[in-house]
Image (cartoon, rainbow, N blue to C red):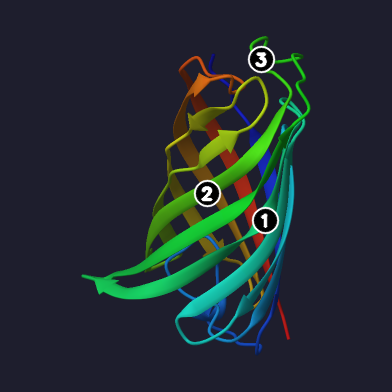
Amino acid sequence: MIRFTASLTLLLLAAPAAAVEDQVPSLLGGESLRGSTAALATAGFATLSIAYGQGLTARDDLAGSAQFNWSTTELVLGGSWRRQLGRVGGWDLAGRLAAGWYLDGGSTLIHDDNLPDRGVQLAPGLALSSRGLGLLTVSLDVPFTVTTWRGGGTWIAPRLAVTYEAALYDRVALGVSGSLAWRGGTGGAPMRAGQVLPELLVTGTWKLD
């Protein structure tokens, strides 16, 4: 089954004010928050998420998050860590790792093979970003979920995304993100039949003092 999702992302950042584009940070790219804090809210056709991030060092960020998909009634509560790994040519490279508790309410409104379930999710990923007229990011994330109902099961959904963000003012940036994922599973996991999941996102970033 193919599903398209449009969403709006609002990012609130606590960081020193600046009038230059490269000082509008992004949680999506390869740059770190560099000691600032961030609150992230995402709303869209199928998803709603919130996150709070803290830049621990010049390279490391930690965040807590909650993500809900109404079309599948899937909820993931957890946290993530991001580390800036350096530069590859003119691109910033970061590794990231998210982990959380997974709950599926079992709605079959959109996906008739969805089932109620719960478990844990681990999602390693990489992000490459480069600044020019805006911030261009290419990212790959691989969520892997282990479920516990119906004898247990697993599902995995590798996702490749390309995001472009451009600053409008010193505190505001807007962008668009397109991604393509493949999801499949084993055992008693919900939605275990292989399916392609494309997604279209609109993003907005707002930096605070």
**Residue farthest along the left direction in this orientation:** 89
Report the disc number at residue 144: none
Mark 2 element type: strand
Q: Residue at x 68, y 26 (%)?
A: 149
Mark 1 element type: strand
Front tag of 1 and 3 = 1
Q: CA distance from mark 2 to mark 3?
A: 23 Å
Q: Earlier in the sequence, mark 2 or mark 3?
A: 3
**Residue farthest along the top direction in this orientation:** 112
Give the residue number, with chain letter if any, for mark 2.
Answer: 122
Q: CA distance from mark 1 to mark 3?
A: 24 Å
**Amino acid marked by disc 2:** Leu
Local crowd at mark 2 within 10 Å, few (<14), some, or many (≥20)?
some
Q: Is residue 141 left or right of residue 204?
A: left
Residue 58 spot, x, y in % from top left? 47, 87
**Amino acid marked by disc 3:** His
Vertically, is 104 above or below 27?
Answer: above
- Are the residues flagged by discs 2 and 3 in contact, CB closer than 8 Å? no
Q: Classify the position of the C terminus by image quarter.
A: bottom right
Q: Can you tell which quarter of the image residue 35 is in? A: bottom right
Front tag of 2 and 3 = 2
Vertically, is 33 above or below 121?
Answer: below
Residue 196 spot, x, y in % from top left? 47, 22
Q: Earlier in the sequence, mark 1 or mark 3?
A: 1
Give the residue number, with chain letter if any, for mark 3.
Answer: 111
Q: Earlier in the sequence, mark 1 or mark 2?
A: 1
**Amino acid marked by disc 1:** Gly
Mark 3 element type: loop
Give the residue number, with chain letter if any, for mark 1.
Answer: 78
Q: Residue at x 49, y 78 (%)?
A: 60
Q: Is residue 74 left or right of residue 166?
A: right
